[in-house]
Amino acid sequence: MVATLQSFGIGVDYHGAAVGPAFIRVKLKPQLGVKVNSLLKLSADLQVQLGLANPPLISPQAGYVSVDLPRPDRQVARFEDYIKSQILPATAPVKIAIGVNLEGQLVEADLSDPNTCHFLVGGTTGSGKSEFLRSLLLSLLVRHSPQHLQIALVDPKRVTFPEFERMRWLYSPVVKDSDRAIELMDQLVTQMESRYQRFEKAGCADLSTYNQRSRQPLPRIVCIFDEYADFMAEKETRTALEQSIKRLGAMARAAGIHLIIATQRPEAGIVTPIIRSNLPGRVALRTASEADSAIILGGKQTAAARLLGKGDLLYLIGAQIHRLQSLFATDIRLPSV
């Protein structure tokens, strides 16, 4: 790679490499006088010269430029290798598994954190979106009892959550049509308002404080909404859902209610500014276009269009983007609690 870049008149020094499950990150330091931008433009040239199936992802990092090359012997990040089944106490933070980083460590998101309390997830067919949602859900179930955690599932395609339809954690039966989806979101808004009334009477600011003081703790509620685009065709449905998401996104974190909304089609007409501004956490699996990538990650972040699929993802937290490999749960076994 260094020789190829030199043939284009770009001098770089090799600063080592890190090996992840799906790709190898080569670290290059541009020599004095070499502009980073000249490196960023060479993605297609490196694809041709190095014989790669996809253009490599090139991005500036602290002190170097990273070039991500796909591994020919790609590894699977198996769920059971990273998460052990153990029921945590009610006071433990509720975290969801996002994926495995280049150091081989599991990266998780704390749902009580304002930056990661609600999520927008996007990815096209073959990106691994359904497997990501299933492993995320399983990471909650194996560590939290139904007394401390309830799950609401929306599955219009009826194929993402079949193994979870009779689990004890369900807040309500799995929702499969638009009328029930509107009903569910209205129920969550009502639940949020009723919780805030309880908090006010108890002199508490949020769910954690209330549960520490109360003899009857309230469970956290996580709503996982697969294929949001399926509900956007009718204007009435769309308006009703957007208003509920807006209210929950703005206020539900302290009440212990969290939204994870996923779509295969993160287009501007589906993922509207109202949705984006109220879902701070972002996960982009491979997208069908650069425009779709920018809608999920914001700004000019088009890199999700060049991901490898099958769980290769970009996780945006604050202003930082991390490239991770989603966990893969080969055998869904619900804990018996």
Image: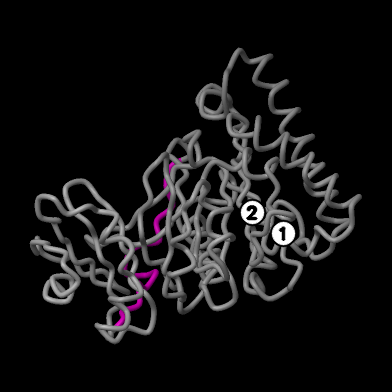
Q: Position of residue 168 (x, y in %)?
A: 64, 59
Name the quarter where the N terminus is drawn.
bottom left
Q: Position of residue 276 (x, y in %)?
A: 63, 44
Q: CA distance from mark 2 to mark 1?
A: 7 Å
Which portion, as a residue range, is magenta? 74-89
Q: Position of residue 196 (x, y in %)?
A: 69, 23
For residue 6, above or below residue 281: below
Query: For this rendering, which residue is in front, 109 or 336?
Result: 109
Q: Who's the residue at 23% across and 66% down the image?
A: 25
The reply to whether callout 2 and callout 1 are in contact (CB within 8 Å) is: yes
Query: For this rendering, which residue is in front, 282 or 291?
Result: 291
Mark 2 or mark 1: whose residue is earlier in sequence:
1
Residue 98: which disc? none
- Kind of residue sitting beneath label 2: Ile
Residue wearing tag 1: 228
Q: Who's the residue at 69% across and 58% down the image?
A: 153
- Kind of residue sitting beneath label 1: Tyr
331 lies left or right of 101: right
Q: Residues within 10 Å of mark 2 (few under 14, many from 20)?
A: many
301 lies left or right of 80: right
28 lies left or right of 101: left
Q: Who's the residue at 27% across and 74% down the image?
A: 69
For residue 128, above or below residue 53: above
What is the secondary structure assignment of the residue under circle 1? helix
Query: For this rendering, which residue is in front, 143 or 228?
Result: 228
Residue 261: which disc? 2
Looking at the rendering, which quadrant does residue 253 occupy? top right
| Residue 85 inside the magenta-drawn segment | yes
Q: Who's the residue at 60% across and 40% down the image?
A: 219
Query: For this rendering, which residue is in front, 212 or 81?
Result: 81
| Residue 292 inside the magenta-drawn segment | no
